[in-house]
Amino acid sequence: MIRHHHRPRPLGLALLLVAVTALAVPAPATAAGLPYQDPTLPVATRVADLLARMTLDEKLGQMTQAERGSVSASDLTTYRLGSVLSGGGSAPAPNTATSWADMYDGFQRAALATPLGIPMIYGVDAVHGHNNVYGATIFPHNIGLGATRDPALVQQIGQAVAEEITGTGVDWNFAPCLCVARNDRWGRTYESFGETPDLPASLSTLVTGLQGPTLGGPTSVLATAKHYLGDGGTTGGDDQGDTQLSEDDLRAVHLLPFQAAVQRGVGSVMISYSSWNGAKLHGHRYLITDVLKGELGFSGFVVSDWNGIDQIDGATGFTAAEVSTAVNAGIDMVMVPTAWKTFLSTLRAEVQNGHVPMSRIDDANRRILTKKFELGLFERPYTDRSWTSTVGGAAHRALARQAVRQSQVLLKNDGGVLPLARDNNKIFVAGKNADNIGNQSGGWTISWQGSSGAVTPGTTILQGIRAAAGPTTTVTYNQRGTGIDKTYRAAIAVVGETPYAEGQGDRTGSMSLDRDDLRTITTLRNSGVPVIVVLVSGRPLDVAAELPRWNALLAAWLPGTEGGGVADVLFGGYAPTGKLPMTWMNSVSQQPINAGDGKLSLLPQGYGLTY
């Protein structure tokens, strides 16, 4: 692909002298002595000064976010781009923390080479740990954290994730998802802390963990409340579908967690692909400007989802009307991964012909620049490498293991088959999710949809079981259950889902265990040994018909890389404390089923046994 390099506009003499002087001074931030470069001045003063110096093209650049694979460092300098992102699975080669830091610093150098030297901000989906980075700690997905009911733990996780993100240079995380998942058919159900608004609202502590008490701390990362608004309430659980609700119900169910995040000072809000009563959220001025910015008092900036504004008219390709509609609705930064040049020229034309007022452009810039100043990007634009070694470090893995322990929900335990004895025991382990880091981590792990196998370092559930068992205990593993006999005292079937993310994760039909899982469990049962089912899944599955034949059932959700936490519960090193964040269906035909809707569930939200 040929890139056309447009010559940057010539530097004014004063700026040229500033640039030359800056080279000789160790702290370029204040060398020029311009008010916006003075960290002792109030942020609002610095923003106003910088805004007054910016051309239209510089302002439009700040509002534009391009994907790392579709932008060069020189593009950042030429087009004055304000932000870069990594889509799910988009990583430098080799995919190491140091490579990420080097990549980040390269982009940042290019941003700072512009006449005004405005730093770029880099965004990633670190939704359960810094999950695009090989070797990072992968925490349980949100549904598991919802089962912990522990806001303080979730805040600690936010802090740990912020440290790993900081070590790679990245400053902005597209998390947490504060969706209220009302239909378990939805492929993003595991990104929801729970089906009622109290859970995501109380666990919005993740925002505080990521950002710190105030922006600008040593590991402060901008958090994003997403996806605004009603993404978990679509009819049929369709991803990017239509949430058909009255305004009162939309507010009562879906708005509350965003209100909690705004009260915590969340820096950004991402708009949902979905619609509310047929109107696309990406063009919804009432919900974005009147409700979020006006009524809730959100002072950060609003970002679109991946190519989200291109969906407003339902046809492929940006139109001028889509661009003006989205920006006038209140979107401040537009995620246009590949077509960012088209977006820039279209938005410029829409400003010049009066369809988008300059006041709206200035408001968007004021919001974006405020966060860049608050984060300290003007003073500390490059990666702080003192945090790079924390990526996947022992302290974070220990915290993740604690989160796994606390997320386990014991749903059945006939005859006290659990906990298992550590010593003088003989245990058979089977199932496709027993020895598979990829399966136990789920989607958004190294790649967007996730994948099976040894995708990143960690401890599988089988490895956790082997490590937890005493020296006098035999642990035998066969994925299909082949070789079990009645001399074993217990059989553990680790079964359930394989990885998926949105779209591919939607389930319109069955939500049962697959044939292989059912066959494996039958093989174990036929031996006459008590069977403990450990369910690895991103949502409740349709197991009511099988459950009577299982001695025990443990919902492990998607625990991430620290499978030892599952073993901690199985062997009684930790008595289970997790409670269901979702209602467990009696059959798939009941979807949607939620607390308070009067449907007879298999197990209610909040259910959970202990020892």
Image: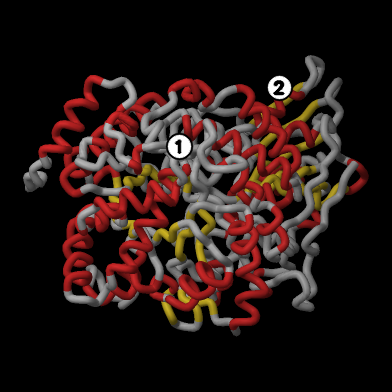
User: Based on the displayed image, in which of its 4 quarters is residue 248 positioned?
Assistant: bottom right
Residue furthest top in the image: 471
Residue at image position (68%, 32%) is: 401
The answer to whether 34 is drawn above or below residue 225 in the figure is above
Residue 399 at x, y = what percent? 67, 32
Say which residue label 2 marks. Answer: 467
Front of the two marks 1 and 2: 1
Please state if 461 lies on the left or on the right of 90 as rendered. Answer: right
Residue at image position (44%, 61%) is: 503
Comes first in the chain, label 1 or label 2 = 1
Q: Amino acid at mark 2?
A: Ala
Instruction: Evaluate whether residue 247 shows in this view.
Output: yes
Q: Amino acid at mark 1?
A: Thr
User: Closer to the camera, 30 or 304?
Assistant: 30
Residue 340 at x, y = what percent? 23, 56
Cα separation, mark 1 vs mark 2, equals 54 Å
Residue at image position (74%, 58%) is: 546
Please state if 530 lies on the left or on the right of 361 as rendered. Answer: right
Please state if 586 lies on the left or on the right of 296 as rendered. Answer: right
Residue furthest right in the image: 415
Residue 350 at x, y = what percent? 21, 72
User: Based on the displayed image, in which of its 4 quarters is residue 172 positioned?
Assistant: top left
Q: Which mark is residue 40?
A: 1
User: Based on the displayed image, in which of its 4 quarters is residue 18 positioned?
Assistant: top left
User: Closer to the camera, 102 or 79?
Assistant: 79
